[in-house]
Image: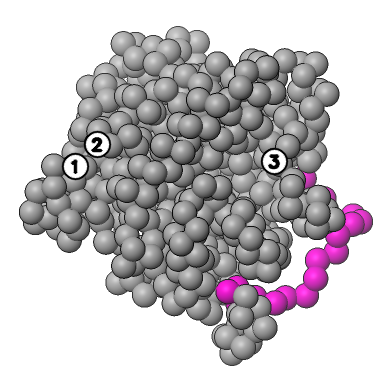
Amino acid sequence: MDRTAQLTSPALARGIAYDPPPLSPTGPGSLHVRAARVLDGNWTGGSTVPSRNLYPHQWSWDSAFIAIGLRHLSPLRAQTELETLLAAQWADGRIPHIVFNPSVPLDAYFPSPDFWRSSTAGRAAGAPRTVQTSGIVQPPVHALAAWLVHLADPGLSRARGFLAGVYPRLAAWHRYLLHRRDLGGGGLASVVHPWEQGMDNSPCWDAPLARVAPAPARSFRRADLEHGAAEDRPTDLDYGRYVRLAADYRDAEYADRKREFAVEDPAFNALLIASEHALARIARELGATGTARHARAQRLTAALVDRLWDPEREIFLCRDLRAGADGADGTGGTGGADGGLIPERGVSGLVPLLLPELPREIAAALVRTLSGPHFGTGTLLVPSYDLLGEAFDPHRYWRGPAWFNTGWLLERGLREHGERERADALAEAVLRTADASGFAEYVDPYTGEACGATGFSWTAALALDLHHRQRAPHDERQNLDKS
């Protein structure tokens, strides 16, 4: 499709400028078959790698998204995916962002197990002794995934004691985030490394990262450049800063305190709130009331609005907890004892749309921002960063490309707040672009050109989930996954 066709597409009126031919819903050439083939090819027997070459281990939030799609192929495999990840949980409650496969050579991925040294540097925090992991975390999508996986086959789930087995671990995970990671004292969880938030290279991190002295280039080897184009990946300078932050955290034995990089992120906390709602449902399924968890989700939603909502920009912003009181450290935000807001519009600031108890006027403002010039004009899919921002790049990792997990989250958010037509348009755009790109890791938001790895697991999994939900009758779709 050329740009003229994009800009005159009838779908543009719905906020999504994409109107390609329909997919074949069934048969050997269907999206279901192609997505299943990706997930089967990346399955290792107990978990699913994001990509065979680029990411050859188990990643935390990847596995949560993967399980959500796997439930349509094999509820048992989806349960196993989450159980394998949770088996690597640390005693302090953290779920590490990588669980390493010991059969994979050390030089296949960096940072490798010998960098993180989890069993030694993480001993005080309760790192497992029988498996090697990283020491940082990723967004807490896991309880939401566990609930959705349960609903795929409640009989199997109850027979295996799936929810009873994962609930204590998920509760410990949330306690860790709400207590050890409340570094700003305002009730929200903080991240201490860009990799923890998941949107690694976002321009939202540029100001906080500018304080960090990079590790020397000779001290690490970038395995990612062997499988991805350099112009699509983080720069060597940014990567050096990532390495420095991770090494400093490791050398401090993974103790949690306000470090050089300490940020409250809207998507990370929105996913924590969504998972608190899911834990409330899990508690009720297990015979408890879930009332306390629902009340906690309400308090967290209020804190999110209080600390991160920007009514002028009509989007949630990240809070840099290390920003100076006068805002003179380069953030340009409003400084204070609890840091300053970072004035960059990232897709993270739209993700709170998925929260059911978000104030109506804020949900409406987010829909305007999603559909307006900063994220919605002339694009196939929602970009990861402000289209009008100075740092926008349609190909470079999290600095503009569209990602399928954020599209999936925003589709749920639109549907949650009654935006049925926009949700349907976004779902269709995600499905067609995922399929046409060979289930790419991410894509150019204007053209749909594949970037990063292809045959990417969460892209296939979430496309599979949308495919099945879009085929459900409307009334069933409205109530799907909320039982």
Identity of the amino acid at label 2?
A: Gly
Q: Which residue is mark 1?
A: 338
User: Is tag 3's residue or tag 2's residue first in the polypeptide sequence?
Assistant: 2
User: Is tag 3's residue or tag 1's residue first in the polypeptide sequence?
Assistant: 1
What's the residue at 44%, 77% (across, down)? 373
**Where is residue 397 drawn, in percent x and y?**
43, 57
Judge whether 483 appears above or below 362 on screen.
above
Judge whether 376 appears above or below 167 on screen.
below
In the rendered view, does 305 fall on the left or right side of 80? left
User: Is tag 1's residue or tag 2's residue first in the polypeptide sequence?
Assistant: 2
Label count reads 3
Q: Which residue is mark 2?
A: 184
| Circles 1 and 2: CB atoms closer than 8 Å | yes
Q: For the residue carrying disc 1, how many other residues have a C-alpha within 10 Å: few (<14), some (14-19), or many (20+)? A: some
Can residue 105 be seen in the rendering of this structure?
no
Look at the magenta stretch and give its main secondary structure.
loop
Rounded to the nearest angstrom, the CA distance separating label 1 from label 2 is 6 Å
**Where is residue 375 drawn, in percent x and y?**
46, 70
In the rendered view, does 140 fall on the left or right side of 217? right
Rounded to the nearest angstrom, the CA distance separating label 3 from label 1 is 36 Å
As for residue 30 lying within the magenta part, the answer is: yes
What's the residue at 81%, 66% (across, down)? 23
Q: Secondary structure at mark 1?
A: loop
Rounded to the nearest angstrom, the CA distance separating label 3 from label 2 is 32 Å
Q: For the residue carrying disc 2, how many other residues have a C-alpha within 10 Å: few (<14), some (14-19), or many (20+)? A: many
Identity of the amino acid at label 3?
A: Lys
| Circles 3 and 2: CB atoms closer than 8 Å | no
As for residue 83 lying within the magenta part, the answer is: no
Q: Secondary structure at mark 3?
A: loop
Q: Secondary structure at mark 2?
A: loop
**Where is residue 314 drawn, in percent x and y?**
38, 65
